[in-house]
Image (cartoon, rainbow, N blue to C red):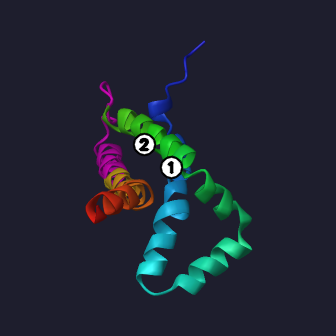
Amino acid sequence: MASIKWSDKPYFRWLTLFVASGTLVCCVLPIVLVSLGFGAVAAGLFYNIPGLVFLAEHKMWTLSLSALLLGFLAWMIWSPNQQCPADAQLARHCQQAKRWNKRIFWLSVSAWSIGFFFSVLLLPLRQLLDM
């Protein structure tokens, strides 16, 4: 019986990125909307989509889970013993997929960092500076 190697499953990488993007919905999207002057849109989203309120109320769990998933995804992207096929065309597609995985990963990490900064660090820093 062959063992399942999760790093070989491209759909699992996309699923991990999708789940990790919960940070975008709970923390980054409202901040961006309010910063751009669309506070009423953010309020409307929270009013019409009850799941957003749940994510925002449990933002530490959301951020922790998404950080864990991003760490797992980093391990999958940069794990050793990954080989592309010997066929030139398939190898080119494999290398292109690896490049896109890395780009999407770093985009997700930056979105997570923005969400973490604004939802966890900004208020304590502001209170510290006001003293």
The kind of residue tagged 2 is: Leu
**Vertical placement of 74 versus 113: above or below?**
above
Quadrant of the rendering where the N terminus is positioned: top right
The answer to which image quadrant residue 46 occupies is: bottom right
Q: What range of the chain is rendered magenta?
A: 79-102
Identified at 37% across, 32% down, the residue is 75
18 in magenta: no
Residue position marked by numbered label 2 in the rendering: 70
The residue at the far top in this view is: 1
Q: Which mark is residue 10?
A: none
Q: Earlier in the sequence, mark 2 or mark 1?
A: 1
Which is nearer the eye, 109 or 96? 109
Q: Residue at x 55, y 17 (%)?
A: 3
Is residue 90 highlighted in magenta? yes
Q: Are marks 2 and 1 in contact (CB under 8 Å)?
A: yes
Main SS class of the magenta portion in the image: helix
> Considering depth in this image, is 69 or 48 the residue closer to the camera?
48
Q: Which residue is mark 1?
A: 20
Residue 124 lies in what quarter of the image? bottom left
**Percent position of residue 14, x then y:** 50, 49
Label 1 CA crowd tier, 10 Å (few <14, some 14–19, many 20+):
many
Q: Going 66% across and 80% down the picture, which residue do you hit? A: 44
Q: Nearer the viewer, residue 30 or 76?
A: 30
- Where does the C terminus fall, quadrant-wise? bottom left
Q: Position of residue 96 (x, y in %)?
A: 31, 52
Q: x, y percentage for residue 76?
A: 40, 34
